[in-house]
Every structure is written in structure tokens, then in C-alpha cells.
Amino acid sequence: MAALAPTTAGAQAAHPSGHADEAFDLMNVLARHGLHDLDDERWNLYGQFTYISSWKQPFSAPYTNAGGSSNSLVPERERSFTGSLTFFLGVRLWPGAEAYVVPEVIAERPLSQLRGIGGSIQNFELQKGGAETPQLYRSRAYVQQTLGLGGGRTKRPSDPMQLAGAVDDRRVVLTVGNFSVLDFLDRNSFASDPRQQFFNMAFMTHAAYDFGSDARGYSYGGVAELYWDAWALRLARITPPQQPNQLSVDFRLDQHYGDQVELEHRHEVLGQAGAVRLLGYHNRVQAGRFDDAVAAYQSDPRRNAAACPTFHYDSTNASAPDLCWVRRTTDKVGVGVNVEQHLTDDVGLFLRAMISDGQSEVYAYTSTDRSLAFGALAKGSAWRRPRDLAGVGVGLGWISAAHAEYLRMGGIDGFIGDGRLRVAMESVVEAFYSVYVADSVWLSADYQRLTNPAFNADRGPVDILGARAHAEF
């Protein structure tokens, strides 16, 4: 699967904490003793710990994994969890140049082995191929060079993966190394951070954004950004996995790659900040097309899911087509819009919408081909809890006609495939409340209502309760 990996928080205006005024903060402690310059940092070090638990309630399902298919969400009660510990180290190399290294430990248990949900997976921290035993890995290691072009000056605060200091409002920023593309593209102040904001994947980025990444959500490559006052333009080329939704990376960036382009404009409406971002992506990867898989099976039933000779998703359905027979160099494209708007200093709205072509299998993210998500996020200032955070959101997803026909015939992809399909829009409604406890610690309660899981009107709805503990240091 792909990139279910966390990113750092969005704009600090929407984040319930700013590190600068936290008591339990190494950078602040050193600064108070004259050992660290918070206005012009040479280095910084931050960390976080997040534990999320989800409880899926039993739901109605007239069939599960029909005909030997293997990707249904099981209808029985289940519990899922993730626990992550991350350290963010930043170092200034020379004027304008910074290096970042981010080691992480994660342990997890998904619902139904992370199968049976399209673009509304209940916990964005989940990674395909994870384990309940904690695993240590390097999530990011990259170098960034900023070239000033003049204009005004903006002061950046000290933060994870950001050294404090002033930068030109007109500048070029070049990044090379290992990172999540969501560190740079499709940011949203109100829906980007699963460790502080919404739990569900539908609100962390476009569910239909099949950006190239390994099974943990990270890539190698480069990002070029041009900032020009209220405008920004971003270009990126990143590595896809060698096989769909797997951990090993294809480094042949001249042959297989994910290209992204994003245009951003920041604005004010009635004195309140907002932004609009247009995003396009193009994958060139070894993937199977749904219509090719159906045609291959219809022309020769021996080319079925149970007989796959190459990489496949473990279906034993001998009467179903499979993408394993038709993988070749394939192009996939999508375009989306991302909007955020403050209503007050403490309340904001967000909206994301994306259309992908829907002709080939999910390569690195979710099975959704069209997605729409919107909602609101609010700090608790109105009820004298300024560090509390509350949110409500709606996420909607659809699949293409070719994708639906492949699933209807019993085919499966990286996440879904019940063996049959009565196609419908998959949707999730989520509401959460996060309570600030003390010393950079929050506790959150969450409720999600998932309808038509895996785009199948025959199954669900599903109720999921969640809880989260999050600490920053």
C-alpha cells in the first residue's frame, strides 16, 4: 500500500500548540540558559509520541471474501492500534543550507490486515506491512538549500524540520533526499496532521492522490519550490515502489517515477487568512489496467487470480481476473484542488477534491479514483480551552467504471475486493475532540461512521470508536 505515513503539522495558526511557548521543550530550556538562539538556529531537536487505538463495531455483511477473494473488511468486532515515536534533528550546514534526519519507531495492528476499506482508513498512521513488534527505521534524511531573491522578510519559528530564522518572501528552495512528498505538497492548516487533527486518511490528503512512495509513505527524489510573495510553485519527482504498495523502491527515476506540480495562492477574506492550491500528478510505473485484466481473463480463463505467476495479492478466486497478468509501463494522472479558510483566528474550514483517471491499479496510496473531503477545525478558545481542538469532517470517494467492473467480476487490488460488488459511494463522517492535559500532552476521543466500505452497498455501515494520546517534546 502506500503512503500512510505521518507528516509534520500544517501552518502554526491552526496547530493547537506552538513550540515556542511550551514548557517541556528542550529548545526553550537551552534558550533560557543562553545555550541556544531561538531566533537564528544552528540546530534543533524535537520529538513526538502518539498512540492511537480504534475499535470497529460489528456490522452487516451478506458475504465476505466471496469466491476466494481476499480483501474484505471482516464484519466481526476488531481492535486496531498504532504507536509511533519520532525524533526530528535539523542542522544548518552553511548559509541557506539545512540538513534533516528523522528516525522513527512504529508498532501497529490494522483492521482486517488493512483490507476492505477504500479511501477512508480510520487511522492515517497505519502502514502496509507493519507489525505489532516495534520497528525502527529512518523516515527522512534530506538536504535543503534556500536561495533568497529579495522582497520582504518572513521570520520562521523553530519547529520539527524547520530551523528558526528569517527568509526572503521571494526565494527558491531546493530539497534532495528521502522524505514524504506530503511534507511539501498538499499541505492544509486544518487537515494534514493525524497526530493532532483528524484520524482518518480521508482528511490527511486527497484520497485519490496516488503519489509515489514506499509502503511506509516515503520516497527518494527532489523538490523545487519558488515562493513569490503570495504565490508558490512546487515541482517534484519521486521514486515509486518496485511493486505496487510494497516497501522496496524503484530508483530508476529516468524510467519510473512520480511527478507532481502544485500552484498555491495565499489570500485574505475579510481580514482572515486562506489559501488555494491546485495539484497535478503523473505516475509512470509498472502497473496493470483494469480493462486489460478483464480482457485477459475473458480471452483465456486460465489467466485468473488463483493462477498468478508473478506478484499478486493472494486471491484464490479462480473465476476472477487479476492485474498480475497485465502489468506493464503505464501512465496515471490526476488533478485536485485544496482550499483552506480561516473564519476567525481559531476556526477554519477546509475542502479537498481530486479526480484521477481511474484506469490502472492503486500503486502507492488508496483505491479511490475520485475524492471529496470537507470540514471544520476549531480551537477551544470560545469555551476557555484555547489548547483544546475539535473537528468534524466528511469524506466521500468513488471508483471509475473500469475499476468497478473489475471488482464486480471478483478481482482485487491492493486494498479492496469483496468478490462481488454493488457499486456505491464510500463515505466517512468523523468527529473528534482533543483535550490539552499539560506539558505538551493531548488526549483525544474520536467517532467515525463509514458507509459502503470498499465502495460496496452490500456491506456496512461501520461504526469506529477511537482514542489518541499525543505528546511533543
Image (spheres, grey):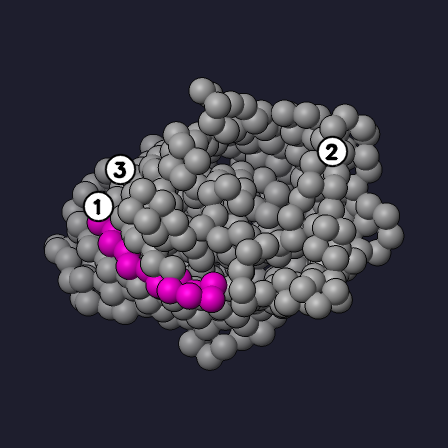
For residue 418, above or below residue 428 = below
Q: In this view, does 300 lie to the left or right of 153?
A: left
* Mark 1, residue position: 451
Amino acid tagged 2: Arg
Asked if disc 3 and disc 1 are in contact, CB closer than 8 Å, the reply is yes
For residue 369, above or below residue 85 = above
Res 131 label: none
Q: For the view shown, which residue lies furthest in the right direction? A: 94
Q: For the view shown, which residue lies furthest in the top direction? A: 270
Q: Position of residue 423 (x, y in %)?
A: 24, 39
Badge 2 element:
strand
* Mark 2, residue position: 153
Q: Position of residue 161 (x, y in %)?
A: 65, 54
What whole-number distance in Å separates the C-alpha atoms at marks 3 and 1? 8 Å
Q: In this view, does 390 lie to the left or right of 309?
A: left
Badge 3 element:
loop
Amino acid tagged 1: Thr
